[in-house]
Amino acid sequence: MQLSIVIVTYRCKDDVLKCLSSLSPRSGGQGASQVIVVDNASGDGTVEAVREQFPAVCVLALDENIGFARANNLAAQHATGEFLLLLNPDTIIPEPGTLERCVEYLAAQPSEVCGMTCRVESTDGSLQWECARRFPTVFSECAKAFFPYRRWDAIPRFDETKAQAVPCVLGAFVLLRRAAWEAVGGFDEQFFLMYEDVDLCRKLASHGGKLLYWPEARIVHTGGQSWKTEKPRTYANTHLSSLQYVAKYWPGSERGVKGVFRLALALKKLATRGNPDKQAMIAAAQEALR
């Protein structure tokens, strides 16, 4: 079996069913791929629905939410394919043959090319620039705290129509040689949610691996249910994982960065008075940084 597809879910039943529907005619349904779904104790009927509608899919139902990184690592232990696709549940594969072409493209590359991503689009067809970017720095992490919507890690003059090597790819769609994944030990499980993809790309680069962006294939990343229903928790994890990332690669800098985060959150709290949703998100992040 050449390709193993790993999907980690948490309270996103509708998303993952749509994702699997986009896969089934052209992957697991034809026996060309192994599909593994790990459910992080969603409690929303995801496990039952996937097992009923997609009996060929391997479902690992967990008793607790162990985090995105750890759940992917667990699934990878069950993978049998030479290639491993890490796929978010809020993605759609819009065209038949997409995954087969991606595997063929990666397989044809020199061995130092350890992985790739494709063109990751929003529902309006625009490129999600984060799918091919630079590595975050201490400066960019601090800057994001105040101006989160600026493209601090964008690659300058990036040509989205051209296949090219890129430093960092988005975890929504990462196709890897399984040998490369195993060589770096998969995801670092200290990252509960967010930044595990950035860290993985850095580890692959430190082992001499290269990642490619290939725009001849595309997926749609809808940005799904879990983010919408778990905003405070996700927002808090973004801040905490950013701090863990800084501490890992720039030891000693995390104290100053935490101070910057706290200042930015305090200012946002003042600016969003009267907005209970944003206040809840800010409070969750402040608690995570205590």
Image (tube, rainbow, N blue to C red):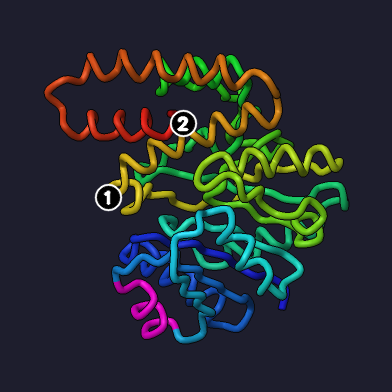
Q: Residues within 10 Å of mark 2 (few under 14, many from 20)?
A: many
188 vs 276, left or right, is right
Name the residue: 51% across, 42% down.
194
Q: Position of residue 101 (x, y in %)?
A: 66, 61
Q: Position of residue 104 (x, y in %)?
A: 73, 62
Q: Quadrant of the C terminus?
A: top left
**Of callouts 1 and 2, which one flags the residue occurring earlier in the amino acid sequence?**
1
Q: Is residue 34 visible?
A: yes
Q: Quadrant of the N terminus?
A: bottom right
In front here: 54 or 263? Answer: 263
- Kindly identify the amino acid type of the residue bearing the numbered disc 2: His
Give the Cα separation between the discs numbered 1 and 2: 18 Å
In front here: 131 or 144? Answer: 144
Q: Is residue 220 magenta?
A: no
Which mark is in front, 1 or 2? 2
Q: Secondary structure at mark 1?
A: helix
129 vs 159, left or right, is left
Name the residue: 65% across, 45% down.
214
Name the residue: 30% across, 74% down.
45
Q: Residues within 10 Å of mark 1 (few under 14, many from 20)?
A: few
- Kindly identify the amino acid type of the residue bearing the numbered disc 1: Thr
Q: Is residue 94 visible?
A: no
Which residues fall within the magenta stretch?
A: 45-54
Q: Which residue is mark 2?
A: 239
Name the residue: 68% across, 49% down.
116
Predominant SS of the magenta segment: helix
User: Which of the 4 image quarters holds residue 246?
Assistant: top right
Q: Which residue is mark 1?
A: 229
